[in-house]
Image (cartoon, grey):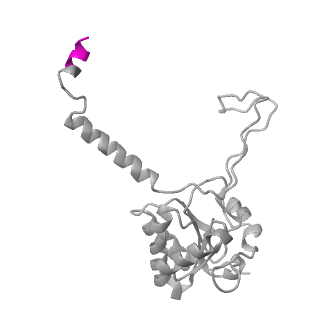
């Protein structure tokens, strides 16, 4: 009753201190929410069948059963990825195996993804800076190539993209993402095919610096002798 009287007397619950705190929280949530997008083109795993109860404590395997494997880590790009011919915005199809011996950045993105739009100008700058030293960049849209053709072409023109752009088939996206359902995703690959660094999402303060460091590491690394 005391609380109701206070509220009826015109005292607002939204004091300046509470309002400021709420605005700060909302700003933090918005900042983290803009770091990556969920990929609509990635196949999502089917939910488990309800016929068998699922144990809540997964710290130890049930006797007689194998432990659940951890998500795979991409160390080198699989042959199923590097040997696929992928549709390109212009020119011949994109085939990642054609970049053997180069330091390569593979970027999964989409025109509708806000963080992708923030990252691509940085990729344009990095390619301009390191192209003469042996860097190549390939951007692979996760969108439907037929439905997005004009939009991607316009995007390339508007953003003055200076590297090759094409589309990633669903099976290639799945093989690269390894269950991480977010874009942009970028892979910095050494001359010998080793994945030096994988980036999931985009942080304007950290990602460009860390990607540049990974590229420089790859350029300074000698290719494995045959």
Residue situated furthest right in the rendering = 64
User: In the image, is residue 221 part of the stretch drawn in magenta?
Assistant: no
Prevailing secondary structure of the magenta residues: helix
Nearer to the camera, 173 or 131: 173
Residue 109 horizontal/vertical position (percent): 57, 66
Q: Residue at the spot x=47%, y=84% of the render?
A: 128
The quadrant the C terminus occupies is: bottom right
Left or right, 78 with reference to 105: right
Residue situated furthest bottom in the rendering = 132
Q: Residue at the spot x=56%, y=81% of the render?
A: 163
Q: Residue at the spot x=70%, y=82% of the render?
A: 98
Left or right, 25 with reference to 35: left
Residue range of the region highlighted in magenta in the rendering: 1-6
**Labels in figure, total:** 0
Q: Residue at the spot x=68%, y=71% of the render?
A: 146
Nearer to the camera, 108 or 226: 108
User: In the image, is residue 4 part of the stretch drawn in magenta?
Assistant: yes
Vertical relation: 93 (above or below) 38: below
Residue 95 horizontal/vertical position (percent): 71, 78
Residue 90 horizontal/vertical position (percent): 64, 84
The quadrant the N terminus occupies is: top left
Nearer to the camera, 41 or 7: 7
Left or right, 68 with reference to 216: right
Residue 191 horizontal/vertical position (percent): 63, 78
């Amino acid at each position: 009753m005391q609380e109701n009287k206070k509220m009826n007397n015109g005292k607002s619950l939204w004091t300046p201190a509470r309002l400021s705190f709420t605005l700060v929280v909302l700003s933090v949530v918005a900042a983290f929410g803009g770091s990556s997008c969920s990929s609509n083109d990635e196949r999502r795993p089917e939910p488990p069948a309800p016929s068998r109860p699922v144990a809540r404590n997964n710290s130890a395997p049930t006797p007689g059963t194998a432990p659940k494997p951890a998500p795979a880590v991409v160390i080198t790009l699989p042959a199923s990825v590097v040997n696929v011919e992928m549709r390109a915005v212009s020119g011949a199809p994109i085939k990642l195996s054609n970049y053997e011996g180069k330091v390569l950045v593979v970027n999964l993105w989409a025109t509708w993804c806000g963080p992708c739009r923030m990252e691509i100008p940085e990729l344009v700058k990095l390619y301009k800076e390191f192209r003469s030293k042996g860097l190549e960049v390939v951007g692979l849209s996760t969108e439907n190539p037929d439905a997005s053709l004009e939009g991607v072409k316009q995007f390339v023109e508007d953003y003055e993209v200076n590297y090759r752009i094409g589309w990633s088939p669903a099976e290639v996206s799945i093989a690269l993402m390894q269950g991480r359902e977010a874009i942009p995703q970028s892979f910095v690959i050494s001359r010998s095919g080793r994945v030096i660094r994988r980036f999931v999402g985009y942080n304007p303060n950290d990602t460009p610096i860390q990607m540049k460091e990974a590229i420089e590491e790859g350029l300074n690394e000698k290719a494995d002798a045959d």
